[in-house]
C-alpha cells in the first residue's frame, strides 16, 4: 500500500470517527430529559432540614436536603392556597379560577377538570413521553376525569383526599351513608378500577406503595429507553399524618416525626433508583409541596418564618419548599429568592421537553427555564394574584403584598378590609404591620386588570361544569 493511499485511508477513518462523535453528541443533546416530579401534600415551608426543619421537627431529612446541595433551592416558590387549585394550576398552566377548580370539592357537583383542559401530561405525551401519576389526584373522581383520562398512561392512588381515610373510625359512620374512597388504578384508554378501601390501615401503607410503583415505572422506562414523566403525588403529611408501621417509633419523637422520616426515606429510594439506573444526568428531579402546612391539631405543621397555613393568602399558606436537580444543567448549591409560582411548571417543563403549550386559551404559566438553568439570575415573573376559592384575597408583587381581605386561619371567614393592607415582606415577614408604600398598588392593580381583561373573551369556567364543555365562541 502506498504512503498516499495509507494517508487517505487514515484521513477517511478520522473523518468517520469525528462524524460518529458529532452524531453521538448531537443525539445526547437532543435526548429528552426524564422528569421525576415529587409533590408532597400540605408540607409547610419550615418542615425539612434545608428550610430550618428536619431535626428541629424531630427527624432529620438528609435525602431530601441533598437535592438542594446538588441543585437549586428556591426560597420564594409559591402555590395556590388549597390542594385542588394548586394541582390544577400545575397540570394546566392556568390559574384554577379559570378552570372551575378554585376550591377543594365537597361533593354534589361534577368536580374536577373538564376534558377540554389540556394537562402537562397530555402535552408531554404528545411529545413522546411515557407518563404516570402515582398518589393523590384531587382533580376528578369519576371516569372521564381521572388521570388516565387526562394524559397519563397509567396511574395508581386516590382520586380525592386523605382525611376520608378517617371516616371508618368515626362514630356513627356507615358505608351506606358515605362510601369510603377507593384506592384505584387505571391505564390510558381503559376504565379505572377500584382496588381497595382507603381506610386507616391503608393510609399508613399507601406512600410506601406509591414509592414502590414509581421506582418500578422508572425501571421499565429506563430499560425501554423512553423518556418519562413520573408525577409522584405523595399523601404525606396531610392529616392524619401517620407513618408506615415500619417507621412507627423510629424517631422516638411521635407519629409526625416518624412520618417525616418515612417521607425522607421514600424520596431517597426514588433518588437511588435514578442513580442506579444510570439516568441521573438526564433526569430532572423536582421536590415541592402543593401549599402551606396542615392546620388541624394534632397534625398541624410549620411554615417556618411565615405566618398562616393553607387556605389563607398569608405567606405561610402559599410559600413552599422547592428544589430542582439536573446534573450538568442546574448549578449545584444555588439558592435564590426570586419569585416563582407552581403555575409556571407547565410552560417551563414543556420548553425543556420540547412539548407544546396550548395557544387557544389564556395561559398564566411563564417559561422559567432560563432562570432555573442559570442563564438568567432573574425570574421571568414579578408577581401574581392570590385567590381563596373564587375570591381575590391578595396580590403579591416583588417583596410586597396587597391584602384585600383579612383571614388568619382556614376557619376564619375572609373579612373585606375597608382599606387594603400593604405589606413589605422584607421588613414585616409576619404580615402584621401595614405600610404606607401606596405606590406599589399601581403595578399590583395593573396585574389584576390584565388578568380580568383576558376573561372577557375567555369566561371563567364555573365549578361543577359537566362534560362535554366547549368555550363560548
Image (cartoon, grey):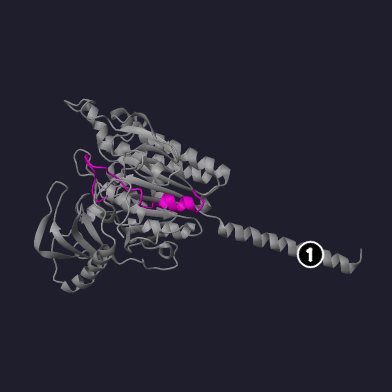
* Quadrant holding the C terminus: bottom left
Residue 160, image x and y in percent?
29, 39
Could you tell me residue 182's position as x and y percent? 32, 32
Q: Quadrant of residue 337?
A: bottom left
In the rendered image of this protein, does residue 202 appear above or below residue 290?
above
Q: Is residue 267 in the magenta section?
A: no
Asked whether residue 247 appears in the rendered view, the answer is: no
Q: Is residue 409 above or below residue 439?
A: above
Residue at point 33%, 30% (across, down): 202
Is 26 in front, or is 237?
Answer: 26
Element type at mark 1: helix
Depicted 178 relative to depicted 333: above or below? above
Q: Residue furthest right?
A: 1
Q: Residue furthest bottom?
A: 439
Query: Horizontal and vertical percent for residue 400?
Result: 22, 66
Quick one: quadrant of the N terminus?
A: bottom right
Assign the magenta stretch its main secondary structure. loop
**Furthest residue in direction front, as rendered:** 473
The magenta segment is 101-129
Amino acid at each position: 500500500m502506498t504512503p498516499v493511499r495509507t494517508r487517505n485511508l487514515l484521513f477517511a477513518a478520522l473523518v468517520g470517527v469525528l462524524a460518529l462523535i458529532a452524531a453521538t453528541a448531537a443525539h445526547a443533546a437532543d435526548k429528552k430529559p426524564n422528569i421525576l416530579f415529587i409533590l408532597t401534600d400540605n408540607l409547610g415551608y419550615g418542615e425539612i432540614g434545608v428550610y430550618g426543619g428536619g431535626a428541629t421537627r424531630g427527624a432529620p431529612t438528609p435525602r431530601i436536603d441533598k437535592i438542594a446541595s446538588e441543585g437549586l433551592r428556591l426560597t420564594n416558590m409559591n402555590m395556590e392556597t388549597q390542594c385542588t387549585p394548586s394541582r390544577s394550576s400545575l397540570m394546566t398552566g392556568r390559574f384554577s379560577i379559570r378552570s372551575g377548580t378554585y376550591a377543594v370539592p365537597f361533593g354534589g357537583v361534577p368536580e374536577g377538570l373538564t376534558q377540554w383542559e389540556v394537562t402537562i401530561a397530555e402535552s408531554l405525551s404528545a411529545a413522546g413521553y411515557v407518563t404516570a401519576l402515582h398518589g393523590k389526584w384531587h382533580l376528578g373522581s369519576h371516569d372521564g376525569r381521572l388521570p388516565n383520562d387526562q394524559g397519563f398512561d397509567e396511574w395508581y392512588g386516590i382520586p380525592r383526599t386523605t382525611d376520608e381515610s378517617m371516616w371508618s373510625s368515626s362514630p356513627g359512620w356507615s358505608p351506606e351513608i358515605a362510601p369510603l374512597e377507593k384506592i384505584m388504578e387505571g391505564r390510558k384508554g381503559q376504565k379505572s378500577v377500584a382496588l381497595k378501601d382507603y381506610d386507616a390501615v391503608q393510609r399508613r401503607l399507601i406512600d410506601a406503595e406509591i414509592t414502590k410503583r414509581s421506582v418500578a415505572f422508572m425501571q421499565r422506562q429506563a430499560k425501554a429507553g423512553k423518556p418519562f414523566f413520573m408525577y409522584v403525588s405523595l399523601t404525606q403529611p396531610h392529616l392524619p399524618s401517620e407513618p408506615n408501621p415500619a417507621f412507627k417509633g423510629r424517631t422516638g419523637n411521635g407519629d409526625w416525626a416518624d412520618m417525616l422520616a418515612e417521607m425522607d426515606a421514600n424520596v431517597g429510594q426514588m433518588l437511588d433508583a435514578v442513580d442506579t439506573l444510570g439516568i441521573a444526568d438526564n433526569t430532572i428531579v423536582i421536590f415541592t409541596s402543593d401549599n402551606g402546612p396542615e392546620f388541624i391539631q394534632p397534625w398541624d405543621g410549620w411554615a417556618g418564618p411565615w405566618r398562616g397555613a393553607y387556605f389563607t393568602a398569608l405567606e405561610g399558606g402559599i410559600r413552599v419548599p422547592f428544589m430542582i436537580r439536573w446534573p450538568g444543567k442546574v448549578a449545584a448549591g444555588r439558592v435564590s429568592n426570586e419569585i416563582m409560582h407552581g403555575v409556571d411548571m407547565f410552560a417551563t417543563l414543556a420548553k425543556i421537553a420540547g412539548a407544546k403549550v396550548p395557544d387557544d386559551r389564556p395561559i398564566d404559566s411563564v417559561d422559567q427555564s432560563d432562570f432555573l438553568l442559570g442563564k438568567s439570575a432573574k425570574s421571568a415573573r414579578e408577581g401574581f394574584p392570590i385567590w381563596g376559592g373564587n375570591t381575590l384575597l391578595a396580590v403579591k408583587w416583588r417583596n410586597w403584598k396587597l391584602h384585600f381581605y383579612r383571614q388568619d386561619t382556614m376557619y376564619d371567614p375572609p373579612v373585606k378590609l375597608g382599606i387594603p393592607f400593604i405589606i413589605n415582606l422584607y421588613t414585616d415577614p409576619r404580615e402584621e404591620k401595614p405600610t404606607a408604600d401606596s405606590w406599589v398598588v399601581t403595578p399590583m392593580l395593573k396585574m389584576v386588570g390584565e388578568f380580568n381583561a383576558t376573561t372577557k373573551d375567555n369566561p371563567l369556567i364555573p365549578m361543577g361544569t359537566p362534560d362535554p364543555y366547549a368555550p363560548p365562541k
